[in-house]
Amino acid sequence: MGVVILLLMAAGVAAMLTRRLPTAFALVLLAVAIAFAAGAPLTGKNSVLDTVLQEGAPALAATMVAILLGSWLGKLLEETGIAATLVRKIVEFGGDRPVFVALGVLAVSALVGTVTGSAPAAMLAGLIGIPAMIAVGIPKVTAAGTILMGIAVGVPFELPVWQFFSTALELPVDTVRGFMVKLFPFALVAAVAYVLVESRRRGVEHTWSLKSLEGRPTSRGRRQLLGDAPWYALLTPVVPLVLALGFELAIIPSLLAGVVYALVTTTRPREMNRRLLRTLYGGFEVAAPPITLFVAIGILLAAVKLPGAVDALEPLVKAVSPQNAVLFVLVFTVLVPLCLYRGPLNVFGLGAGIAGVLIATGIYPATAVLGMATSYNQVFGVADPTSTQTVWAAQYAGVSPQQVMVRTLPYVWAVALGGLCVTAATQL
């Protein structure tokens, strides 16, 4: 029966890779098929309808709320001009020094990445950042990659991601936060190395002129003309992070505090109601795709944790899972590409189910699976040509997602290696 379940998983991967089915739909169908293959009854305890679908769908509800709040805060950063102002200030500070401009945009991307992920984060930092970098001579591929590498620096501190791994792997948020802090230096070093190496290795390429940077206004109406947010409002991306990391406040209240701070520091009292509703509704539009995916992931996790599925998969998975720390690092480092193209190790797809199997069968402790999953997530978020942020950044810069993948993959592969080394040293 375990072989049948593995074949079903392979079929699910094929359906996602060939785009015959959207990822969320494929995961739900796969979950139902696994449940039936594991001998689950239609209704009752450990059943298809009551356990997999009914209990699985809302299993990641806390993550969905965190995603919505992060998207809401992202819309506020966009509408109030906070994100655009951050990028403009960096570009002005960097002047015509390409590396300084790129490093500044990298820093802004990291800040935005702590608030929201995927395409919204890329757009917030990239709408101005990518043309600015290209205008001062940064190659197009490097400009797109800089945005993505910057977002990856912020991902270890992205509160909705903390909530996702905490809920999906049934770990305390403190445990997730502790590993993310250890992963951050690897992401930071890799991102800075990417900017320094790629911008100098490929040289300066003057291909675009950025009209928005020409003839900068210097009059008293500069803020109104450019839409600059007040300086104190620029602290908005830091507020949730300080509360969650420094004061260990819960994730949802921390994100709500960021929303309130952004609103109070940028909006007149009589306009608050309209802006609140407008950005909230906009946040729902942004959050809809990931929330749909998390519903499907919850259903898949419920299916692979059924007793029949665990009993069937345990001997097979245990036979191929390395227990030695060195082999653990070597094997899972070599397998890094399997998280690309919506592959089987993509944690926002079938990889979540595999993580659930590894924990449910007791092959690895949940903390070790956390280390592996978060390390792979650093690769997926930057180099996967099918991820929305990679597609947007590449297309906006005028290059293909595959070109971005080739340039960024060595750097994020090194980040994954670092995360796996820390996991093996501390958890195995």
Image (tube, helix red, strand yellow):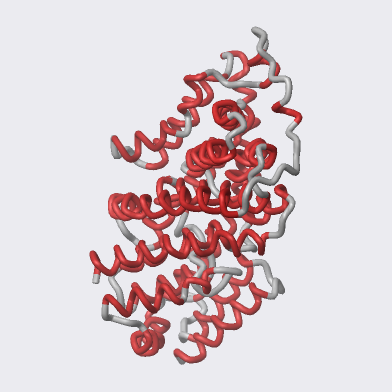
- Counting labels gives 0
* Residue situated furthest top in the rendering: 220
Q: Where's residue 38, x and y in %? A: 46, 85
In front: 327, or 267? 327
Q: Residue at x 52, y 69 (%)?
A: 339
Q: Residue at x 47, y 58 (%)?
A: 378
Q: Is residue 346 above or below residue 112?
A: below
Q: Where's residue 97, x and y in %? A: 58, 35
Q: Where's residue 96, x and y in %? A: 62, 32
Instruction: Identify the image quadrant of residue 371.
Output: bottom left
Q: Residue at x 40, y 58 (%)?
A: 165
Q: Where's residue 387, x and y in %? A: 61, 59
Q: Is residue 4 above or below residue 178?
A: below
Instruction: Identify the image quadrant of residue 251.
Output: top left
Q: Is residue 103 visible?
A: yes
Q: Residue at x 72, y 55 (%)?
A: 399
| 356 sits left or right of 6 in the view | left
Q: Quadrant of the C terminus?
A: bottom left
In front: 412, or 115? 412
Q: Is residue 163 visible?
A: no
In front: 123, or 73? 123
